[in-house]
Amino acid sequence: MKRFHFPLGRVLDWRRTQVRIEEAKLERAHAEVRRIQGEIEAVRTRQAEAARALLQDGSATGIELAAFSGFTRLAAEERARLSAAAEAARQRARRQAEAVVQSRQKVRPLEKLEDRQRAAWNIAFARQSDLDAEEAHLARLAALRREPES
């Protein structure tokens, strides 16, 4: 009996490849969110370090206070810009997650069809194997009966 062949195997392989591509895009989207979150934390850390340095010195001049005030304003603007970018990246990640789900939904019916066809092939293969074994056994019995006794 010939080996199992799923006629839609190439389509199934292509759809599985599409799933992997969509999953890779999703991972990149999550990485972008993590990168932006890291930038937000870096801005917070720099601002906190600048405040600590200003307070540690204890004798800040007016110029240093004005510079710190400007830095604080710029840091807040940068955090707001990064927060907006992070939210946009999270939305892209959510849309990409939906694309992954949709691509997986296109694979499932083909996988189920392949499983059903493979199960049917396995049953047919087992039947054929049983028939072949039975024929071989009967052929041996017939050969034994035909042998002249010595």
Image (tube, rainbow, N blue to C red):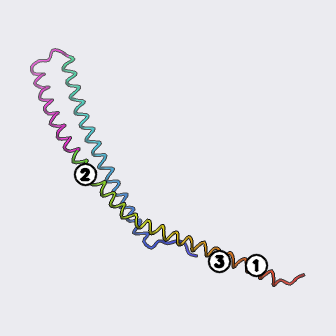
Q: Residues within 10 Å of mark 1 (few under 14, many from 20)?
A: few
Residue in the image at 57% along x and 74% along y: 124
Q: Main secondary structure of the magenta part?
A: helix
Identify the residue under disc 3: 131
Front one among 81 and 106: 106
The first of marks 2 and 3 along the sequence is 2
Q: Is residue 113 magenta?
A: no
Seen in the image, is 144 located left or right of residue 131? right
Residue in the image at 24% along x and 50% along y: 91
Seen in the image, is 2 located left or right of residue 17? right
Residue 92 rendering spot, x and y as whole percentages: 25, 51
Residue 128 rendering spot, x and y as whole percentages: 61, 76
- Residues drawn in magenta: 57-86
Identify the residue under disc 1: 140
Type of amino acid under label 1: Arg
Q: Is residue 78 magenta?
A: yes
Label 2: element kind: helix
Q: Are marks 2 and 3 in contact (CB under 8 Å)?
A: no
Type of amino acid under label 3: Leu
**Vertical placement of residue 78 versus 129, above or below:** above
Identify the residue under disc 2: 92
Q: CA distance from mark 1 to mark 2?
A: 70 Å
Label 1: element kind: helix
Q: CA distance from mark 2 to mark 3?
A: 58 Å
Q: Quadrant of the N terminus?
A: bottom right
Type of amino acid under label 2: Arg
Residue 126 rendering spot, x and y as whole percentages: 60, 72
Residue in the image at 22% along x and 22% along y: 52
Q: CA distance from mark 3 to mark 1?
A: 14 Å
**Vertical placement of residue 57 versus 86, above or below:** above
